[in-house]
Structure formats: C-alpha cells, structure tokens
Image (cartoon, helix red, strand yellow):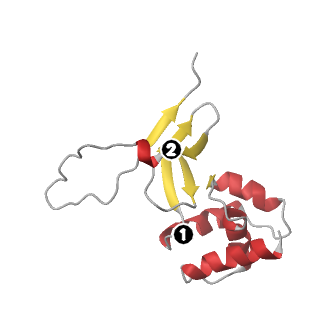
Amino acid sequence: MSDTQLENGTKWLATAGLRPTRQRVTLATLLVGDGNHRHVTAESLFDAAKDGPDSVSLATVYNTLRAFCDAGLLQEVTVDGSRSYFDTNTHDHPHFYWEDEARLSDAPSDQLVIAQLPDAPEGAEIASVDVVIRLRKKS
C-alpha cells in the first residue's frame, strides 16, 4: 500500500468520525485507497487483507464492515438471504448480480425507471428502494 492509499483510507474514516485503528485503516485502504468504488464480500476483503502486512481476522472484517455501514461509509446490498455485498458507493443506484460469477456490479441509473411504488402500510414510510437485477449467461 502506498502512502497516498493509506492517506485516502484514513481520510475516508475521518469523514465519518471513526477512530483510525490499525485494522480499520487497513480495511479502509483496501476499500477506497485507490479512489475507485468496489463491491466486496466480507470473505473477499478478508482474503485481500491477509496478503498485506497487517493481518485481521474474519470476525474483525465482519465487525468493521458493520461499523462502516453504521457510519454511512458503506451500503450493504443483500443478494439473497445468505450473501451480502458491501458497496463503497453509498448513493442510491441499481446493481447487476452476475449469478454465474457471484459478482455484483453497478447498473446504469439513468436507464432505470420506476413509475410507481405501492403505498406504504399505515404508520410506515418507504426509506429506500433496492434494485438488484440478476443476470446469467444465455444458453
């Protein structure tokens, strides 16, 4: 990791007021150090972190991802009941889920049109709408 990448990760944590612990800086740098958005699973981030100089446990990765979500730094995208991805782009946008590759990517927002949503039940309001478009290769 370069000094610039470490600085980017540390600044990202500071925007949410999170204390820059060694583990948080390591994971933040992997997530945003190069300035690009990414979609990761806890397992893929753990795999990337274990190749670096500062090791982190899988439990720490899960806990840190949860803290990043709670702080508004990440968006959790649930693809099915057992698989979650974490997106560094926290703006509302749709996703493609590539079933054959178990991979998540951004879908073009400007091509998505939602004409009408159902009324929320009494005493509730719609907080957000998540759109995941499942893809598979044509047979």
Report the amino acid beneath label 1.
Leu
Whether residue 128 is situated above or below residue 103 in the rendered picture: below
* Residue under the point 66% across and 60% down: 36
Q: Is residue 49 left or right of residue 79?
A: right
Give me the C-alpha separation between circle 1 and circle 2: 20 Å
| Whole-percent x, y for residue 88 in the image | 57, 61
The front one of 45 and 105 is 105
| Whole-percent x, y for residue 62 in the image | 61, 62
Name the residue at the front extreme: 110
Q: Which residue is mark 2?
A: 107
* Residue under the point 61% across and 69% down: 64
> Label 2 crowding class (10 Å Cα cut-off): few <14, some 14-19, many 20+?
some
Query: How many labels were placed on the picture?
Result: 2
Give residue 33's quadrant in the image: bottom right
Which numbered circle lies on residue 73?
1
Whether residue 59 is situated above or below residue 118 in the rendered picture: below
The front one of 80 and 31 is 31
Q: Is residue 71 left or right of residue 115?
A: right
* Residue under the point 46% across and 38% down: 133
Q: Secondary structure at mark 1?
A: loop
The quadrant of the picture occupied by the N terminus is: bottom right
Q: Is residue 68 left or right of residue 44?
A: left
Q: Secondary structure at mark 2?
A: loop
Report the amino acid beneath label 2.
Ala
| Whole-percent x, y for residue 12 in the image | 62, 75
> Label 1 crowding class (10 Å Cα cut-off): few <14, some 14-19, many 20+?
many
Name the residue at the top extreme: 139
